[in-house]
């Protein structure tokens, strides 16, 4: 099985873009930016980002003998994000489950046909996914910190297969975003510095999903924030996903603040067990609903 066979297989699972990078330590510039970001505390309470720095630096530590990283992007875009304006990636089935299933099938085919070992990661290992996506020619990282896939935009989740199989590597596209700064101006938390840096402590996505406890901000959305993607011209022609699992669930779209504030744990578990939204836990979601109620929109 060669590089083109594998790309055909990955595309057949629903990916809008796929590329291959040869494993190596990450570049010095990228490494230095990451270390400065951590040292400045801009990762907020996401202490897991401080860990496994050696693995983040060298993906070969994730799989002995790894030669290649296959990176795939899957479109999750949906126009409707519900009464409370949920982050669009979270409205359907949990992307970790949906994408892992798809890439596991490819990894199994690689192992059966070549005997090579594979490890699938979907935001589940200390792998710098956007860096490797850029190296593999899948897209480029915008001023908004999102990976932008030419022709498909940034409404994509990434999944990777690290494998011991040596494959032909792709080259980075060399493209960069337009630098229009719409994302910087529109960011409600002033979290983007206009040079590609982002302070998670000011980001509404971080505050409403990852942060534990109260926060000093007034979100206008219940979970996450899509503003820096909504305003980006690379997303002007975004088309809704064809992946059935990413279709928004009517049950989530229809939720109002009152429903969430009165929600019991059993109901939360029933609705969100197979949704990425479970990450914020019921307490986090109810905190967000209280903060929304204090804002101007006061959605019911
Ligand atoms: S997700 Fe929202 S708050 Fe965070 S950087 Fe983007 S626009 Fe700013
Ligand atoms: S909004 Fe403009 S500056 Fe921001 S990522 Fe998109 S093209 Fe780049």
Image: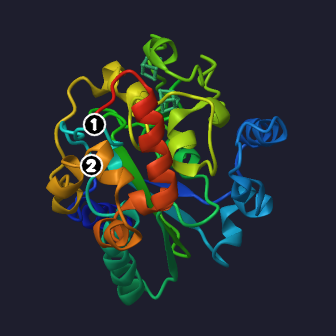
* Image quarter of residue 8: bottom left
37 or 272, which is in the foreground? 272
Q: Are marks 2 and 1 in contact (CB under 8 Å)?
A: yes
Instruction: Name the residue located 30 percent from the left edge and 70 percent from the top edge.
Output: 102
Instruction: Name the residue located 28 percent from the left edge and 37 percent from the top edge.
Output: 152
Position of residue 222 measured from the top left corner of the image (x, y, whole percent): 39, 41
Position of residue 190 measured from the top left corner of the image (x, y, whole percent): 58, 19
In the rendered view, tell whether residue 27 sits above or below residue 70: above
Looking at the image, the residue that sits furthest to the right is 39
297 or 91, which is in the foreground? 297
- The reply to whether residue 169 is in sight is no
Would you call the spot at circle 1 few (<14 residues within 10 Å), some (14-19), or many (20 or more)? Answer: many
Give the Cα separation between the discs numbered 2 and 1.
Answer: 7 Å
In the rendered view, tell whether residue 210 sits above or below residue 140: below
The colour scheme used here is: rainbow
Horizontal side, residue 145 vs residue 14: left or right: right
Instruction: State the residue position of label 1.
Output: 152
Instruction: State the residue position of label 2.
Output: 16
- The reply to whether residue 4 is in sight is yes
- Could you say whether the residue bearing mark 2 is in a helix, strand or loop? loop
Determine whether the beta carbon of the residue marked 1 sits less than 8 angstroms from the nearest atom of ligand 2. Answer: no
162 or 213, which is in the foreground? 213
| Lower sequence index among marks 2 and 1 | 2
Instruction: Name the residue located 58 percent from the left edge and 45 percent from the top edge.
Output: 131
- Could you say whether the residue bearing mark 1 is in a helix, strand or loop? loop
Position of residue 276 measured from the top left corner of the image (x, y, whole percent): 40, 60
- Ligand 2 appears in which quadrant? top left
Task: Please state, as top left, top right, bottom left or bottom right, where the C terminus lies in the image.
Answer: top left
Horizontal side, residue 67 vs residue 258: left or right: right
Horizontal side, residue 222 vs residue 88: left or right: right
């Amino acid at each position: 099985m060669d590089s083109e066979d594998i790309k055909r297989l990955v595309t057949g699972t629903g990916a809008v873009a796929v590329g291959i990078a040869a494993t190596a330590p990450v570049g010095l510039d990228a490494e230095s930016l990451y270390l400065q970001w951590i040292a400045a505390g801009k990762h907020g309470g996401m202490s897991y980002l401080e860990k496994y720095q050696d693995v983040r630096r060298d993906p070969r530590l994730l799989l002995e003998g790894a030669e290649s990283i296959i990176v795939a992007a899957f479109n999750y875009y949906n126009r409707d994000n519900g009464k409370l304006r949920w982050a669009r990636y979270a409205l359907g089935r949990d992307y970790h489950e949906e994408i892992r299933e798809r890439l596991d099938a490819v990894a199994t085919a690689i192992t059966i046909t070549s005997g090579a070992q594979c490890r699938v990661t979907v935001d589940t290992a200390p792998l710098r996914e956007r860096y490797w996506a850029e190296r593999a020619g899948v897209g480029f990282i915008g001023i908004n910190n999102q990976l932008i896939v030419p022709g498909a935009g940034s409404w994509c989740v990434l999944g990777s297969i690290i494998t011991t199989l040596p494959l032909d590597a792709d080259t980075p596209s060399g493209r960069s975003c337009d630098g229009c700064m719409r994302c910087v101006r529109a960011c409600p938390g002033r979290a983007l510095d206009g040079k590609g840096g982002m302070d998670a402590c000011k980001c509404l996505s971080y505050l409403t999903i990852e942060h534990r406890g109260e926060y000093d901000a007034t979100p206008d959305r219940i979970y996450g924030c899509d503003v820096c993607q909504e305003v980006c011209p690379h997303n002007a022609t975004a088309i809704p996903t064809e992946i059935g699992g990413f279709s928004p669930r009517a049950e989530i779209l229809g939720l109002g603040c009152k429903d969430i504030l009165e929600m019991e744990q059993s109901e939360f578990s029933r609705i969100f067990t197979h949704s990425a939204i479970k990450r914020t836990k019921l307490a986090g979601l109810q905190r967000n609903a209280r903060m929304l109620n204090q804002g101007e929109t006061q959605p019911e």
